[in-house]
Image (cartoon, helix red, strand yellow):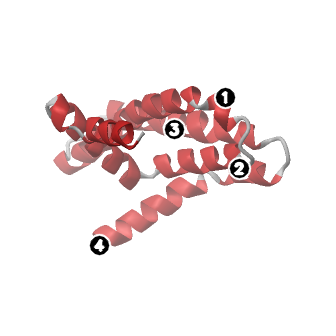
Amino acid sequence: QETKQKIISTASELSDLIPAAVTLFVPGCSSYGVIYVSLIVPAAFSIKSCDEMDKKSSNVETMESKVNDASRFLRFWMIHALVTWILDSFAPILAWVPFSTHVIWLLWAFLQLETSTRRIYGWFESEVEKPLDQTQTLQTVKRVIAAL
C-alpha cells in the first residue's frame, strides 16, 4: 500500500513538470524550463499545502498529513537555498559546459520528488547535528586536500 502511494504521488508530481519538459527540446529555452521547475512548481505546491493547512479538519490523520505536506515544502526550500548557492558558485564553469541547463533542469526535477527531498534533508540535518570534525563534509574536504 505504501509503495502504491509513493508511485501515485511521484507520478502526480512529475505530471506537473510536463510543460517544462517541452523546453528541453526547444533550443535556447531550457533556462525557462529551469525557472519553471525550480521556482514556479514548488511555489504552487507550497501555496497549495498552506491553503490546505487553513482548512479546518477534525480528523487527526488528515491534519497530520497536512502538516507533513507543509513541512516537506519547508524542507524543500531549505534544500533549494543550498542548491541555489552551489549552482551560483559554479555558474561561471557551468556556462561553458554543454547541456548544463538540461542537467540543472533534471536536478531540480529530482529535488521535487518527496523521497529525494526527505533523503537529502535527512543527510543535511545529520550533518548539522554532528560535531564539526565528524561531519562527512569536513572529512571529504580533508581527503581532497590530502590528495592534492
Quarter of image, res 28: top right
Q: In whole angstroms, how far apart are the C-alphas of marks 4 and 3?
A: 26 Å
* Nearer the camera: disc 4 or disc 2: 2
- Residue 51 pos. (x, y %): 41, 32
Amino acid type at image mark 2? Pro
Viewer-nearest residue: 28 or 144: 144
Residue bearing mark 3: 42
| Residue type at numbered disc 3 | Pro
Give SS at disc 1.
helix
The label shown at residue 1 is 4
| Residue that label 1 marks | 92
x then y, percent, for residue 113: 45, 52
**Which amino acid does the dot numbered 1 rest on?**
Pro
Of mark 3 and mark 1, the one earlier in the sequence is 3
Foreground mark, 1 or 4, reads 1
What residue sits right under mark 2 in the picture?
A: 19
Left or right of 107 on screen, residue 30 = right
Q: Earlier in the sequence, mark 1 or mark 4?
A: 4
